[in-house]
Image (tube, rainbow, N blue to C red):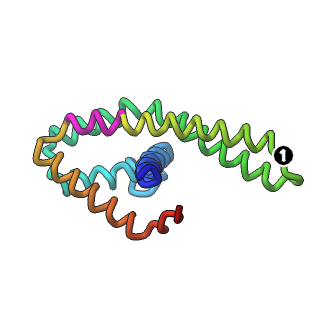
Amino acid sequence: MKATRTRIVCMGAALVLAVSLAAAQGPHGHGGPEGDFGHMMGFFSDYLDLSSAQQDQVKAIWEKEKPTLEPLMQQMHSNHAAMRALEQSGPFDETKTRALATANAQTQIEMEVQHARIKAEMMQVLTADQKTKLANFEAKREARMKEHAPPPPAD
């Protein structure tokens, strides 16, 4: 159960990460000026049938949170690049590797907190029916992830 929850949180964080990276790329990102956020917004707008007022509210939430996410995304990118450079630099240095891994873990925690904050704010915009529809979508996605997940280790 804990492994499943961790996977779900990681997938959610990865989604926020992907959206943040796309937004940080600006007009040169995929999907036009809004990057992948525009694509995601279009999907949820269509799937949940968001009104134009709801779409405006979600965009406002995103714009408000974007300045907090961008530095975290840059830090994660820097940590990853530093880890790759360390791996290619020669003999294994456990102290440096642990320091980089710890820094990346802390940044990941901050990303997950931001993701939870954004989702909580966005949930306030949805109607009860839209919340139910989103919950069903997420449950189906979780079921698909479980189908592709490796079996838990035998005790």
Residue 145 is situated, as x and y percent measured from the top left of the image, at 39, 64
At a point 49% along the width and 47% down the height, the residue shown is 21
Residue situated furthest front in the rendering: 155
At a point 52% along the width and 65% down the height, the residue shown is 154
Residue 149 is situated, as x and y percent measured from the top left of the image, at 45, 66
Residue 151 is situated, as x and y percent measured from the top left of the image, at 47, 68
Identify the element where label 1 is drawn.
loop
Residue 31 occupies quadrant: bottom left
**Which range is magenta?**
117-124
- The total number of labels drawn is 1
Report the front residue among 68 and 97: 97
Residue at image mark 1: 93
Q: Residues within 10 Å of mark 1 (few under 14, many from 20)?
A: few
119 w.r.t. 42: above or below: above
37 w.r.t. 54: above or below: below
At a point 37% along the width and 37% down the height, the residue shown is 116
From the viewer's perspective, tell me whether residue 86 is left or right of residue 9: right
Q: What amino acid is found at the position of numbered circle 1 in the picture?
A: Asp
In magenta segment, residue 122: yes
Report the front residue among 39 and 94: 94
Q: Main secondary structure of the magenta part?
A: helix
